[in-house]
């Protein structure tokens, strides 16, 4: 497996996401950790929780335009 060049690693680290609830409130990023495996970056990022009334979350990448993703949340009981 081929490894990444330093410039490619830098570019890959810049691809982050912002998370919003269905009311447009941005969830604060708490922490994250990742490691390079060949040509991939496996990254785990933690965000603050919502108020519990959100029906969905919107994920918006910082760098890649048009890749917004909506995640429907199960109804709370």
Image: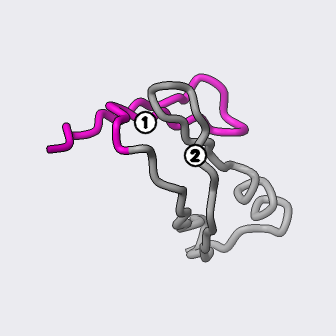
Which corner quadrant of the image does residue 36 belong to? bottom right
Residue at the left extreme, as displayed: 77
Looking at the image, is 15 positioned above or below residue 45? above
Q: Residue at x 68, y 49 (%)?
A: 15
Query: Disc 1 designates what residue?
Result: 57
Q: Position of residue 14 (x, y in %)?
A: 75, 52
Mark 1: few/some/many CA within 10 Å (<14, 14-19, 20+): many
Which corner quadrant of the image does residue 1 belong to? bottom right
Q: Residue at x 59, y 73 (%)?
A: 38
- Between 74 and 59, the one lying in front of the other is 74
Left or right: 73 in relation to 65: left
Which corner quadrant of the image does residue 43 belong to? bottom right
**Distance of label 2 from label 1 (alpha carbons):** 10 Å
Determine the secondary structure under disc 2.
Answer: strand
- Residue 27: mark: 2
Tell me the magenta residue range.
52-77
Q: Main secondary structure of the magenta part?
A: loop
Looking at the image, is 5 positioned above or below residue 28? below
Q: Position of residue 12 (x, y in %)?
A: 70, 56
Q: Position of residue 22 (x, y in %)?
A: 45, 27
């Amino acid at each position: 497996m081929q490894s990444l060049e330093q410039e490619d690693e830098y570019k890959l680290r810049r691809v982050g996401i912002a998370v919003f609830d269905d009311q447009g409130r941005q969830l604060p990023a708490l922490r994250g950790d990742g490691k390079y495996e060949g040509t991939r970056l496996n990254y785990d990022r933690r965000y603050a929780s919502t108020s519990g009334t959100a029906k969905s979350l919107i994920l918006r990448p910082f760098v890649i335009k048009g890749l917004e993703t909506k995640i429907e949340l199960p109804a709370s009981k």
